[in-house]
Image (cartoon, rainbow, N blue to C red):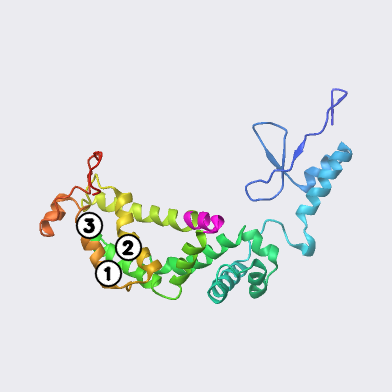
Amino acid sequence: MKTGGTLRPPPKLTPSRDRDGNGYSIGMDACKLQTITLRSVKEHERAGPAGKRERGVKATRETAPGGRQPGRPRSRDADRRILRATYRLVIERGYPELTMEAIALRAGVGKPTVYLRWPNKARLVLAAVLTEMDQRIAFPPSRSLRDTLRVQMRRLAKFLGSPQGKLIAMIFGGGQADLELLQAFREGWVAPRRAYAREVLRRFVELGQLDENADLELAIDLLYGPLFYRLLLRHAPLDGGFVDGIIDSVMGGFEAKSKRGTRGGGRKAGIAARPPRKTGSAAG
């Protein structure tokens, strides 16, 4: 490029994707980036070997083999087939014997297609299980805290007691020896579901049905911990009566005082607003 008789170097092409995943950024201004197209590449064709190399990269990205435009949305059909194949295979073979190769073969896709979507077997298995599970255990819309918990926890207990629920137990067990699986389970299953439950409980704090000082993390542990205890030990059934007993036993310590009084006096224990523990005191 010529300015006042002096040759200036061409703008540097930086191979960083734009928001849509297409094109390259041109570093003409540190504060303003514009996407470069084939036409603008041709305008800088005189830049020499460096410009030609960038032009070749751009042309490759613009027209992939077979005429497919880069950055197009991935196939939802392939996603569904991979998740379904994973779900069926992990039931048939168990987690330790499951391989990404077997999943790709059952789904009718290449192994790279699987890895482009899920980085490892642990996260893929969780995605497959949660796809089946999420639709069954949602919190129902209700203005009654106990009714909301009763419906949602019964749904969860029914799922955990089904053959599909055994996959969750399998993941629990496998995670003790497979840190990658355990981390995927915590991040992909435990954390988002605790956040979901926490938001539901906060809504009932605002409605005046839960004590404003209630320890919501403790409430979640006490409500859902017994379900997973029975899932793992299988010493007793996961049924509606068990769920009702959990709710009646736990919520008396967390409901607002006015609500607690209408339930028959409630308990005097201060679970909702616990004072600091003293050294040597009994666990509350």
Pinpoint residue 240: horizontal percent, then vertical percent: 28, 72
* Within-10-Å neighbours for mark 3: few <14, some 14–19, many 20+: many
Amino acid at pointer 1: Phe
Name the N-terminal-most of marks 2 and 1. Answer: 2
Q: Are marks 1 and 3 in contact (CB under 8 Å)?
A: no
Q: Nearer the viewer, residue 78 or 149?
A: 149
Region of the chain picked out in magenta, as a range: 177-186
Q: Nearer the viewer, mark 1 or mark 3?
A: 1
Q: Position of residue 213 (x, y in %)?
A: 24, 44
Which numbered disc, 2 or 3, marks the residue closer to the eye? 2
Q: Dot 2 lies on which element?
A: helix
Q: Amino acid at mark 2?
A: Pro
Sequence-first tag of 1 and 3: 1
Read off the residue under disc 1: 242
Q: Viewed as shown, does residue 115 lie left or right of 178?
A: right
For label 3, the residue is 251
The residue carrying mark 2 is 226
Residue 176 location in percent, x, y?
50, 58
Whether residue 144 appears in this view of the structure is no
Residue 183 part of the magenta-drawn span = yes
Q: CA distance from mark 2 to mark 3?
A: 14 Å
Q: Evaluate if marks 2 and 1 touch, with contact meaning CB atoms under 8 Å apart.
A: yes
